[in-house]
Image (tube, grey):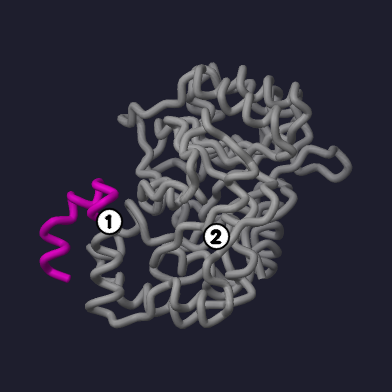
Amino acid sequence: MKSLKATGHQLADSAFQLTVLRREVADTLHLPLFHEKLSAAGLFPLTPVAPAVLQINVGKMCNQVCKHCHVDAGPDRKEIMTWETMQLCLDALAQSDIQTVDLTGGAPEMNPDFRWFVAEISRLGRKVLVRCNLTIIVANKKYHDLPEFFKRHGVEVVSSLPFYSAAKTDSQRGDGVFDDSIRALKMLNAVGYGQLGSGLVLNLVYNPAGAFLPGSQKGLQEQFKRALLKDHGIVFNELFAITNIPVSRYLDYLIESGNYAGYMEKLVTAFNPVAAAGVMCRTTISVGWDGGLYDCDFNQMLDLTVASPGRHIRDFNVAELGQRAIVVNQHCYGCTAGSGSSCGGATA
């Protein structure tokens, strides 16, 4: 692992990341290749079912720099989805039966056309889900009305909160993040989010802080609900427990801390065929900030485009995409370990 540490800065190059994954797992660790595990479970090639979600990354710009971020997002990132590409996404939606649009980033709200995009998606009668980092709501006065904006368009808010204590949250996401997150959650609660009978859905996301798998989603949800209500008077709907995928900053952390081999072994040992059958890439199509099409958000970060003739949103064709084989690699073990992991939490 020493030589990898010496070239850790190269991890920003997605092609290098993929080379590291293949070499370390296939050659050094002698662990089975992911497609071999799928084959043994009768699931290879992995194929899609009718798409239910169009997940769109509207840009990598973010007001935070989180240690576990698989997008490598931050204030210095310039990749941003243009209005023209957003219009292509709307055109694709109009010709499909996809009912849910999952907007992500970075902080998606920092895209200058974000509000227009949300309004247009809503006008098409589709459900809008926004992955909000919470702190963006209190970061600047121009974002303070986001809770009301979300309410007006019936947006489902999904927000990352590493833990219900300041120490663990701030260690992963930066000093002061926990307090700002609590302020934002109270603002969302104040307009009805998470409140019983409001119809305004507020879900939280938990990612482990270290090189281990998340615990029971149900158990974690009970802990979060009890602690946040008792200490802060905050309510929410569900907690999604998501496994950290070994790409980008989290891969960098694993290598620098000497935990890469052990973590990969944990993922492989915990491979669950039931979870594999329910992975999100079977029902989700991911769109990159530049309009590229991917099987999932993680493949997007590794530049693994869909295995389909049309690989850009301008060529969106549901029938063609339905015939593709989903592109898999070693990082896919993260979604199939234990209870499974997806953008909506456990899958098994």
Q: Quadrant of residue 119?
A: top right
Mark 1 vs mark 2, foreground winner is: 1
- Residue 62, can we see it? no
Is-magenta flag for residue 128? Answer: no
From the top left corner, tell me how far across and down residue 35 is, in percent: 45, 72
- Position of residue 114 measured from the top left corner of the image (x, y, whole percent): 56, 22
Work out whether 66 lies above or below 2. Answer: above
Identify the residue at horizontal 39%, vertical 53% (top origin).
68
Q: How far across and how far down the image is residue 91, in percent?
A: 63, 24
- Within-10-Å neighbours for mark 2: few <14, some 14–19, many 20+: many
- Indicate the position of residue 322 as horizontal and vertical percent values: 62, 50
Q: Which residue is mark 1?
A: 17
Tell me which residue sits at (38%, 75%) in the image: 33
Q: Is residue 347 left or right of residue 56?
A: right
Left or right of 171? Residue 187 is right
Q: Nearer the viewer, residue 192 or 2?
A: 2
The range drawn in magenta is: 1-17
- Say which residue label 2 marks: 242
Q: Amino acid at mark 1?
A: Gln
Instruction: Determine crowd level at label 1: few under 14, some 14-19, many 20+ residues with C-alpha closer than 10 A.
Output: many
